[in-house]
Image (cartoon, rainbow, N blue to C red):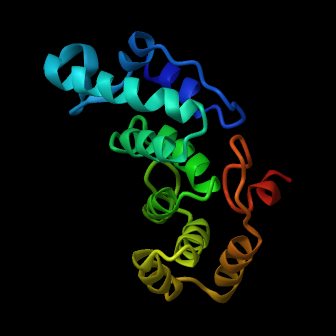
Amino acid sequence: MAAAVLATFAAPAATAIEYTPAGRIEGMRCGGMPVNMIDRNACDALRAFFARWMPRAQRCDAEARWRVGERFLTDRQTAKVGVAWLERAAQQGYPPAQRTLADALERGRGVPADPVGAAAWWQIAAAAGDADAARARDRLAGALDAAQAEAAAERARTWVVQPCGGPLSPGAAEGAR
């Protein structure tokens, strides 16, 4: 059922994702165990979380998308889904999502490590006034070669806030060609 969860939540082109708590939550994992096999209170908390945030995330609420993305990012089986939600919130211009996405890309959580993408998102979040992102950007800059640094700078320079359903990452259009 985890594959069904991934397919349901990771569909990048969808602007509204159908959500039914019983059908989706059963495929999630809580505390490393399938939801239907662990402490009911933990599962109830997870259900309550998704009941609160998922409808808002589906309506393009950037904070909700960030929270949903972070929740999926906590489990290796659903981390890729988390990155997709974080990308959506980051593209909407939400700095906490930009910072979380940059960290995931840098560490390779949910996706293969992408230092260029991470550097671009660190720069975008730093430009929005995030001091922690500026420190992370400066730290990562020392690990990039000149071509990577220029590619990251170009992505950050050309990035613009995307409405709900826009491209998923800075430079995504170039990567699709």
Q: Residue at x 69, y 32 (%)?
A: 15
The quarter of the picture where the N terminus appears is top left
Classify residue 139 by image quadrant.
bottom left
> How many tags in the picture?
0
Q: Pick out the residue farthest to the right.
A: 177
Note whether 125 is above or below 134 in the view shown. above
Q: Residue at x 55, y 41 (%)?
A: 61
Taking depth in this image into account, of 125 and 56 the one nearest to the observer is 56
Note whether 32 is above or below 163 in the view shown. above
Rendering coords of residue 4 (x, y %): 51, 19
Taking depth in this image into account, of 16 and 80 the one nearest to the observer is 16
Q: Residue at x 23, y 32 (%)?
A: 32
Position of 13 with respect to 89 (left or right) is: right
Rendering coords of residue 53 (x, y %): 42, 32
Note whether 166 is above or below 45 in the view shown. below
Q: Pick out the residue farthest to the top.
A: 22
Q: Residue at x 44, y 18 (%)?
A: 24
